[in-house]
Amino acid sequence: MGGDLSIAAKHDTIDFFHLLKIMNNTLKNDRFLRALLRQPVDKTPVWMMRQAGRYLPEYLATRAKAGSFLNLCQTPELACEVTLQPLARFDLDAAILFSDILTIPDAMGLGLYFTEGEGPQFERPLKTAADIKALTVPDMAEKLSYVLDAVSLIRRELHGRVPLIGFSGSPWTLATYMVEGGSSKNFSLIKALMYQQPALAHQLLAVLADAVSAYLNAQIAAGAQAVMIFDTWGGVLTTADYQSFSLAYMQRIVNNLTKEQDGLRVPAILFTKGGSLWLQAMADTGCDALGLDWNINIGQARQQVGNKVALQGNLDPCVLYASPERIRAEVGKILADYGQGSGHVFNLGHGIHPQINPEHAKAMIDAVHELSVPYHQVT
Amino acid sequence: MGGDLSIAAKHDTIDFFHLLKIMNNTLKNDRFLRALLRQPVDKTPVWMMRQAGRYLPEYLATRAKAGSFLNLCQTPELACEVTLQPLARFDLDAAILFSDILTIPDAMGLGLYFTEGEGPQFERPLKTAADIKALTVPDMAEKLSYVLDAVSLIRRELHGRVPLIGFSGSPWTLATYMVEGGSSKNFSLIKALMYQQPALAHQLLAVLADAVSAYLNAQIAAGAQAVMIFDTWGGVLTTADYQSFSLAYMQRIVNNLTKEQDGLRVPAILFTKGGSLWLQAMADTGCDALGLDWNINIGQARQQVGNKVALQGNLDPCVLYASPERIRAEVGKILADYGQGSGHVFNLGHGIHPQINPEHAKAMIDAVHELSVPYHQVT
């Protein structure tokens, strides 16, 4: 018995290391990456914005262990733990780095902090032209190693199960928080800057675009297999201002991004919440996919962008308050609206709400896989 | 001297009553109504959403005198006073009834109240199916006479200077407040109702559509010369849900509205904030004009709706934080984007902010009149 066990153990060890190597270079599930590149898939891939988060009891337990949200983000082992939690529960086709969108302004010295029940805030928001002129692209290895370490660790711990998504806030979105000092209702400070001192606003956005480019490329180097730019507040702009103050800087980032890593294309996804009017312009940046909120019908969006990009979305997160049967019906409608063929990554149109029953998230995810099969059958 | 004065006084009195009669039947400035009906005008008319309000010191003085915001709304003399205040300062082409959008739910028994620094709230929000089933169209004369009295009084006090706009919240927008109990971030309660109990949501919206129809028709009977439906929260819906849960009920109201009063067409304006994707569907309701927020370029909006409706908008309210020179330039861009001919009522894309310097509002209004003349010259 002892001898048998010993042999078995040795054998397992060899297999384990061998397997690990294969796993980390071979994705067991590449449905997400294939759909972003509009290559054939067996079923529509699905993940959820904020899939690691407050609606999961296991997240709340890790969050309590971390002591603070910021500490959770800044401790690679804990960030890795919560990143993987939803994958243990659900049949998700991608993992997304657990982090905050305001890591870059924090690394630039603005002093990010969170108070219970409030949104993010900065100790030192940008108040003067001198504040803006003093900003530089932070040294990634020095200031943001905690993010890059988390990316490497998550990538390793995923064992090739699904791809890992890296992300950043868009320059415009970061700028709103940096100038407003936190969340905003009317965006009056950043817009006053934009309308009254456009050159200064452009200077701020330019340094942010360079910082985001460096940040996303560092995430790719550390193991991120796709990247997403969250332009949460681009939708508060006019069409002309969106072009000049948000999209132009996302364009600059798309131009700067590492396109291939370890022989694989690294797709880039742009998401402007409230940006459905501007999908064609966004597709023209050369990104691989667009995130959609829930305003636009995904079939109409597909007509607009044609074969230029894949589409990710677009279930109203509030549908998850309804029964599993109703959730399934709404998933079915979006799949039907998108129609035949690849190029669709199913997702919510914005982050999952903290109040959602995890079983309802599961109902959505399972419905996507089950109901999408007919749309991918080659006839 | 005494005799002279006496004769003069008598003469003045006769003239005054005569003049009053003429004034109230003859608009001295009908630019606003003509533009809504796409009839030729000499220059583009302009008014501002929330033109009576917290950015004006005289408003704050009346508000202090009233004791509370609700008392200000419910006292016709005070509502009239603040309605007229911006017209004393600025060369505006329309007056809009000073009131709150939640008067109907209040009249339905929900108990509207305001606490300092908070949005509107209800003492008795809708919590059960029974709450919704118990709702009926309130008796206008009994429950909303304070609004109708304010309309009559303002109309009289305007002496035909400019037309008076009546308004209401849209059924969907009223329903959000009634179910959420006040302002909402995610609209999770109303959407849970919509997705889980659609028949009940439709029942609520139907009674609200009938109440809004009766309310606007009562305002028209009392003297409102145009009406506007504010669908402040239609933009949080999907395209399909917007059609079913918001637009269908605005359609019902448009069908119900009094189309003519005292021999004059009473134009109806629909405004869905965040609704730029749905302008064609809105125009198909048979309304006279669409309000635009600032997301869409007004020239593109005009292309979409063709000659079906007039357009009202669409300056970003934050432009008023900039210098008068910059404000003037932004006004010029919108006028140029709209282009030649009538059918445009200049406005902000949403309400003026409380922090705005009234001189900046004046800069906008004057720029509209000055810069728009060339677009109305018949060649």
Image: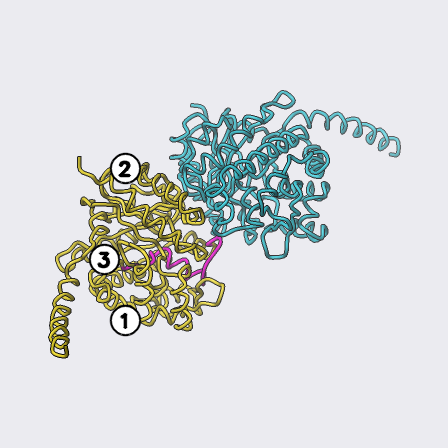
Chain colours: A cyan, B yellow
- Residue B201 against residue A307 in the figure, above or below: below
Which residue is nearer to you in this view: B233 or B128?
A: B233
Q: CA distance from mark 1 to mark 2?
A: 42 Å
Direction bottom: furthest residue: B2
Which residue is nearer to you in this view: A190 or A147?
A: A190
Q: Chain of mark 2?
A: B
Q: CA distance from mark 3 to mark 1?
A: 21 Å
Determine contact: label 1, label 2, CB under 8 Å. Answer: no
Q: Chain of mark 3?
A: B
Going from the N terminus, do you reach mark 3 or mark 2 first? Answer: 3
Going from the N terminus, do you reach mark 1 or mark 2 first? Answer: 1
Q: Quadrant of residue B50?
A: bottom left
Q: Provide the residue span drawn in magenta.
A: B166-187
Q: Chain of mark 1?
A: B
Q: Is residue A370 visible?
A: no
Q: CA distance from mark 3 to mark 2?
A: 25 Å
User: x%, y% of residue A190?
Assistant: 51, 45
User: x%, y% of residue A276?
Assistant: 42, 38
Which amino acid type is shown beneath numbered disc 3? Pro
Residue B145's label in the rendered image is 1
The residue at which mark 3 appears reads as B163
Which residue is nearer to you in this view: A49 or A240?
A: A240
Going from the N terminus, do you reach mark 3 or mark 1 first? Answer: 1
Direction front: furthest residue: B1
Q: Quadrant of residue B53?
A: bottom left
Residue at (38%, 65%) from the top-left corner? B58
Q: Are the numbered discs 3 and 1 placed on the same chain, yes or no?
A: yes
Which amino acid type is shown beneath numbered disc 1? Ser
The residue at which mark 2 appears reads as B339
Tell me the quadrant of the picture where the N terminus of chain A can be found.
top right
- Residue A328 against residue A139 in the figure, above or below: below
